[in-house]
Amino acid sequence: MEPAPQPSSRRVAVVGAGLAGATCAQALAAAGCTVQVLDKARGPGGRLATRRLAWTGPDGQPRTARVDHGAPGFAAADAGFRAFLQGLGGGAAVAAWTPQAAPGSRAVRPAGAWQLPVPDMPTLCRGLLGGLPARWSFTVQRLAREGGAWRIEGVSEAGPELLEGGFDAVVLALPPAQAAPLLAPHRPDWAQQAAQAPMQPCWTLMGVTSRPSQPLDWQVLRPQGGPLSWLHRDDLRPGRGAAVDEAHWVAHARPAWSREHLEQPPEWVLPRLRAAVDEALGGLLGEPPAWRHAVVHRWRYALPQPAGTPARRQAWWDARTGLGACGDFLGGVGAEGAWLSAQALLEAMTAPARAV
Ligand SMILES: Cc1cc2nc3c(=O)[nH]c(=O)nc-3n(C[C@H](O)[C@H](O)[C@H](O)COP(=O)(O)OP(=O)(O)OC[C@H]3O[C@@H](n4cnc5c(N)ncnc54)[C@H](O)[C@@H]3O)c2cc1C
């Protein structure tokens, strides 16, 4: 049996820089590990995501806005998670946001204050990672175990790459469908569970309209029927840039609608979601505001199912080989579940004899 290296002597690769991975990377570095972060995206945050929109205003001038097109915020019921958010350094800060629901809307759950990283969603993970070594646009494709250490094969913009230097441990902080093929050669039991973990897809529309004819005293609309599950006015939220003569919207389609139309092209989805927003806003405002710009994004893996699963401390850790996995699919629905799962993995990694 290979001896489990002490945390302070470990070289650890953290694959995935969403909340679970960034939390692990920061804590492992603080414990003395040499950490290398790898993510296929161009920056940190994962599903805590903000997108830059660019369009031409009615005055013919170029305009830009940033909208949160992944999680619109998250709960923090766990006292440890709340303490973590309050103690954030490195430029990361979180505001309280209590979404006001539109008249006739389905209820916003959970009720009460949500946590909203400011000024954008990825700032939370960016602050956690600080100056840790990170490779962006690097997709991990295969983990190989050789001579008691991990070797990582991936692909970057430059092509296929083999990361030099063995890693004592690898943390996979990925949605389950993306973790499964990496786990399969080493822990087929986990790979099978990950492959079967149900995730809800979500088609999301981000848009800019003229300013509504009347001031809104709500930010969230959850229609009773139709394709939309959620519509929020992004520029009215804490820390977001107020639009001058426009309104910035984010709409999420229902899981069933998103699943049914998952393979449709964006040009098919866009007019349908825009029409659903028009119907929802027209019902409240008399007439919908005029569109100036809109795009859609497909989240194949937005949220674990079933919604409403309580967050819990759960992760996978194989102390013999130094392979671990965490994320919201293990910790329960949402960002809080991702963080709790990261905590479970960190506890297991610093007590290597104990498995979770
Ligand atoms: C539309 C939408 C609405 C949501 N609403 C809410 C909500 O209301 N409340 C709430 O709490 N949560 C919500 N969530 C979920 C929340 O965002 C997630 O639970 C949480 O952010 C998951 O964090 P994570 O670190 O587990 O995974 P992720 O944030 O998904 O991070 C995984 C990272 O791994 C990277 N990656 C994947 N595969 C590879 C690979 N092979 N190689 C390298 N990198 C890879 C990805 O690029 C990503 O950065 C929502 C999410 C979406 C998309």
Image (cartoon, helix red, strand yellow):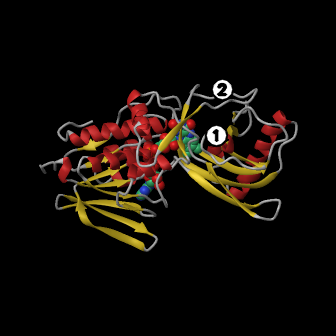
Tell me the number on the disc at residue 61.
none
Quadrant, the C terminus: top left
Residue 220 in the image: x percent, y percent? 68, 35
> At label 2, which amino acid type do we have?
Ala
In this rendering, position of residue 239 left or right of residue 35: right
Examine the image and state in which quarter residue 81 appears.
top left
Q: Nearer the viewer, mark 2 or mark 1?
A: 1
Q: Are marks 2 and 1 in contact (CB under 8 Å)?
A: no
Q: Nearer the viewer, residue 184 or 311?
A: 311
Can the viewer see residue 178 in this picture?
Answer: yes
Question: Residue at (81%, 42%) from the top-left corner?
Answer: 212
Q: Tell me the residue that label 1 is attached to.
A: 237
Q: Residues within 10 Å of mark 1 (few under 14, many from 20)?
A: some
Q: Vertical placement of 132 versus 19: above or below?
A: below
Q: Tell me the residue that label 2 is attached to.
A: 107
Question: Residue at (21%, 59%) from the top-left corner?
Answer: 149
In this rendering, position of residue 190 left or right of residue 352: right
Q: Nearer the viewer, residue 153 or 278?
A: 278
Question: Residue at (18%, 53%) from the top-left corner?
Answer: 9
Among the two numbered marks 2 and 1 on one chain, the one whose residue lies closer to the N terminus:
2
Residue 245 in the image: x percent, y percent? 78, 50
Q: Vertical placement of 96 versus 170: above or below?
A: above
Question: Residue at (16%, 50%) from the top-left corner?
Answer: 5
Extreme-bottom residue of the structure:
158
Q: Nearer the viewer, residue 13 or 323?
A: 13
Residue 275 in the image: x percent, y percent? 79, 46
Can the viewer see residue 303 in this picture?
Answer: no
Q: Provide the secondary structure element on which disc 2 rests.
A: loop
Q: Residues within 10 Å of mark 2 (few under 14, many from 20)?
A: some
Q: Provide the secondary structure element on which disc 1 rests.
A: loop
Examine the image and state in which quarter residue 282 appears.
top right
> At label 1, which amino acid type do we have?
Arg
